[in-house]
Image (spheres, helix red, strand yellow):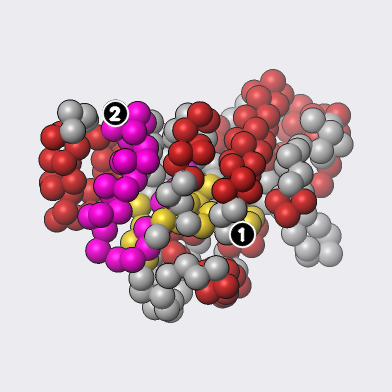
Amino acid sequence: MNIAIVSHPRSGSSYLTRVFAQFSNVQTVMEPFHPNDEVAIQHIKHCLADNFSRFENDIKLAGYAIGTYAHEQPVKFLTLLKQYVNKPTLVFKLFPEHIQKTQFHALFNVVDGVIFLRRNQVHSFISSQIANETNVWANKNTSDIFPHFQEDAFLWWNKFIVSYFADVNNVVYSHGIPFTSIDYERINVENSTVELLSEWSKNNNLNVGAYTASKINLLQQDKRHLATEKVNNPHDLQACLHKYGIFHLNSAFEPNGKVALLKPTFMSRVSGLFSRGL
């Protein structure tokens, strides 16, 4: 079985993948379709371990390099990858730009379940800016970095992410693939995440097995709750939030402690996910 975590950068997807890895029947691979071949190969090597050389040799016999095969023949690539996994279920991440939109229908023919993972788009945009400027993607505190917020770049980011989720959502519905959705602000509550994944998998006959870990911590690189605390031009960011009517997305939490973000309503097939006022 293959389960895809459909997400975007700076959303907590690596943490969710690590949680999935603690289920007894699951093998995970972070980003096998990453556009940077070196990054993709690193993730695949970690997944396949001693089986990697045989996997690579099979691709060479087909006349391809690993990266080319992944992007030109994604179904064959994923099917071959699964053959060298030693557990019943493979879980992998799928981000925008990993594969072409025209390949979605073919790829999801060999996907048995989908997790939609989203994060408040203001925070994910700024976190991506920080990561791109510092080249720090994990395991280092970035609370002292203040990128410059640019409205045009944010609007492009929001449209890009919204379009990606809408396209995948339509394909998932057309194929009748079981899915569930999680947001970043909730995945740090590990017990509820594990319970959700366990119940969803069981209800849809997805063979993930039993959860075997005691606890996995979400390592937050940046503990600043307000988006305006993360940029060097907070007034411009605040003006943008006001302009598009997304005031509450300046904070991860409302005053009453409830999570404050626009939730993706996949069941009603709302295509304007996270795009109120944009």
- Residue in the image at 28% along x and 49% along y: 81
Magenta span includes 187 = no
Say whether residue 57 is left or right of residue 204: left
Mark 2 residue type:
Thr
- Determine if residue 42 is in view: yes
For disc 2, the marked residue is 68
Q: Which quadrant of the rendered structure holds the C terminus?
A: top right
Magenta residues?
67-94
Query: Is disc 2 placed on a helix, strand or loop?
Result: helix
Coordinates of residue 37 in the picture (x, y in percent): 29, 32
Coordinates of residue 91 in the picture (x, y in percent): 41, 56
- Residue in the image at 14% along x and 55% along y: 50
Coordinates of residue 97 in the picture (x, y in percent): 48, 31
For disc 1, the marked residue is 180
- Residue in the image at 78% along x and 63% along y: 258
Which of 78/272 is in front? 78
Magenta span includes 82 = yes
Query: Is disc 1 placed on a helix, strand or loop?
Result: strand
Say whether residue 34 is left or right of residue 218: left
Which of 197/245 is in front? 197
- Residue in the image at 46% along x and 39% along y: 106
Q: Which quadrant of the rendered structure holds the N terminus?
A: bottom left
CB within 8 Å, label 1 to label 2: no
For disc 2, the neighbor class at 10 Å (few under 14, some 14 to 19, many from 20) is: some
Residue 62 versus residue 274 in the image, above or below: above
